[in-house]
């Protein structure tokens, strides 16, 4: 309904938040696949962003593989970089999926999303 309404209203972007999906919950992942299929019948899906928590370890790679298979991930958003987490798993995820890291979350507010800067990220990983 949201995509139809957005198309009617002439908006450029309709954001669909499917938060709370766990890759090991088959029912939820099936539902995500269905959401993707239904949306693509209504309008072209131009971007599918996987939101990864920077505190996620190796499980992040498994999560990314499953989400990419089900939803066709086109980019990554790495959140919670405002704490002590460094988000190193995103390097493996980016290599595995071959998609760019687009945004980083540096807080909880809407203005706390920033474009991904590889140099700043690597400096943070290496403690520079």
Image (tube, rainbow, N blue to C red):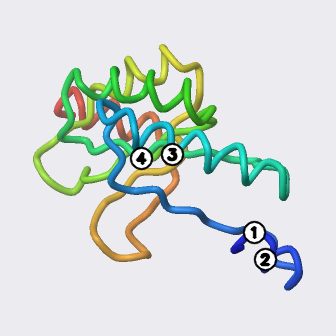
Position of the C terminus by quadrant = top left
Give the secondary structure at mark 2: helix
Q: Please identify the quarter of the rendering in which residue 86 is found.
A: top left
As measured in the structure, the alpha-carbon distance from the residue carrying label 1 to the one carrying label 3 is 17 Å
Question: Which residue matches tag 4?
Answer: 51
Under tag 3, what secondary structure?
A: helix
Which of labels 1 and 4 is toward the front?
1
The residue under the point 31% across, 60% down is 106
Tell whether label 2 touches label 1 (CB within 8 Å): yes
The disc at residue 31 is 3
- Mark pair 1, 2: CA separation: 5 Å
Q: CA distance from mark 3 to mark 4?
A: 18 Å
Few, some or many residues within 10 Å of mark 4 (<14, 14–19, 20+): some
Relative horizontal placement of residue 122, taking residue 98 as reference (left or right): left
Q: Quadrant of residue 91?
A: top left
Residue 6's disc number: 2
Q: Are marks 2 and 4 in contact (CB under 8 Å)?
A: no
Residue 51: x and y in percent read 41, 47
**Disc sitting over residue 3 in the figure:** 1
Assign the N terminus to one quadrant of the image: bottom right
Q: What residue is rendered at 86% in x and 74% in y?
A: 7
């Amino acid at each position: 309904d949201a995509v139809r309404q957005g198309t009617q209203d002439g908006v450029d972007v309709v954001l669909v938040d499917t938060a709370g999906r766990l890759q090991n919950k088959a029912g939820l992942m099936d539902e995500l696949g269905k959401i993707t299929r239904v949306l693509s019948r209504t309008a072209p899906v131009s971007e599918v962003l996987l939101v990864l928590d920077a505190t996620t370890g190796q499980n992040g790679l498994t999560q990314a593989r499953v989400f990419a298979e089900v939803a066709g991930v086109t980019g990554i958003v790495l959140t919670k970089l405002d704490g002590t987490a460094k988000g190193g798993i995103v390097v493996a995820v980016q290599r595995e999926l071959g998609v760019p890291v687009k945004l980083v979350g540096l807080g909880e507010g809407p203005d706390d999303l920033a474009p991904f800067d590889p140099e700043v990220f690597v400096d943070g990983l290496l403690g520079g």
